[in-house]
Amino acid sequence: MYFPVFLSLEGRSVLVVGDGPLADNKVRLLEKAGALVDRHAQAPEDLSPYALAIAALEGAAAEAFAAQARAARVPVNVVDHPALSDFSVPAIIDRDPVTIAIGSDGTAPVLARRIRSQIESLIPQRLGALASLIGRFRGRAKQVLPEIADRRRFWDGVLDGPIATLALAGHDVEAVAALDHVLSTNLTPLSGTVQIVGAGPGDPELLTLKAVRALGEADVILYDDLVGEGVLDRARRDAEQIYVGKRAGEPGLGQDVINALMVARAKAGQRVVRLKGGDPFIFGRGGEEIEVLRAENIPHEVIPGITAALGAAAEAALPLTFRREASALTLLTAYRAPDAEAIDWAAHANADTTLAIYMGRESAGAVARGLIAAGRDPSTPAAVIARATRPDQRVEIGRLDHLPRLVALAGEGPSLLIVGRVVARAAPHTQEQRLAV
């Protein structure tokens, strides 16, 4: 079993012997660590100047090199030969100055690389920037808080609060100013943060990595009706979950109440996730919530989600644009389609444009009549995708003038209407119940 250790090689000579991509990779890693790399196709006679020796060799050459290095008391690694090696080179997650290493004692490097990939998906890309920020203020914090326990609690608060959120989001100037302020004002507690997070169309596997991290760190989650089953399973176990959704035709919390909840919880120092189906900025009222947070000077961040049109089209293998067939895509809400003055259908009559129509299940008849009256061919291919990306998804394909019948066949639940030539290119398995055109 190896003893894990991080070794400083800054300005020290390291020997790499061998050719090919394995040797190239070791040279790259060593140079990034500041080592002075001396590379040879064959081992030089004198190894004493080197702090380490690494070889990409096979057979008798590998055995001879290992023996030579040990005789010179130089730690040696022979790539893919643990028995000939004094140390192994781990799989590395680099968030300079943070380094995470995964080793398998040289026995299963492929497994170590797979573990690295899994861990890397959970580590913010800008973790190094946060570490550098902490390092910059570490000495000052020690002066202000001479007791170790007090400093530990202070840094825990920084990592759990808005300063870390600012640093991880790339707002370095604001993060520095905030940390300087909190160390200059007797450690006055800062307000919490709000992350407005897109949950995607339903399938929890379509959450972004950043959304998963936000759910895992939230103190309280305010979630909508369209958040798919299984998404909240990604939340921290002790996070408070508050349903703030509203279904069509049913009473629900007003937007003012939701806004007040976000503000109150953030000002109480909590990390708030406002979880919305799809993407917050596409028919999700995320823009209105941002305006409220700005007015209250609450640190906030928007984490985009896969919007329903993209998720539904992908599930049906339906290209929303296609060369020489659909050169434009319009995202449209039909929530007020029955109101004749609500939608300018003439603006959406171009046959080269694909229409992805949100909240159109109840208005399918008005949508079809409006588009046909504006000049769209009644036989234009059309699809209704209900409960997109969920296990009970249903895709119905037919003609524009059959849109209400397609909706009826697709059944209840959130539905997306797609109108345009590209609908005819949907995957064959989605067309088994196609209505005759």
Image (tube, helix red, strand yellow):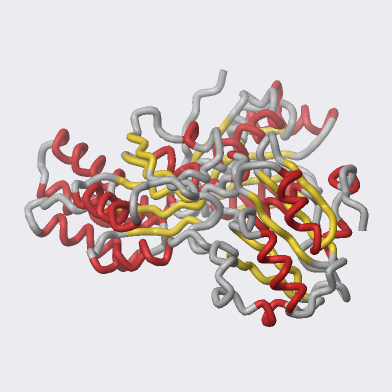
Q: Residue furthest bottom?
A: 346
Q: Residue at x 73, y 73 (%)?
A: 371
Q: Where is the C terminus found, in terms of image quarters?
A: bottom right
Q: Residue at x 57, y 18 (%)?
A: 1
- Inspect this view and state whether residue 98 appears: no
Q: Residue at x 52, y 47 (%)?
A: 199
Q: Residue furthest left?
A: 186
Residue 253 or residue 12, whichever sits in front = 253
Q: Residue at x 63, y 59 (%)?
A: 363
Quadrant of residue 343 within the rendered picture: bottom right
- Inspect this view and state whether residue 424 appears: yes
Tally the marks: 0
Image coordinates of residue 124 in percent, x first then y, are 48, 48
385 left or right, relative to 307: right
Compared with 373, 303 (above or below) is: above
Image coordinates of residue 299 in percent, x first then y, are 30, 59
Residue 305 or residue 166, whichever sits in front = 305
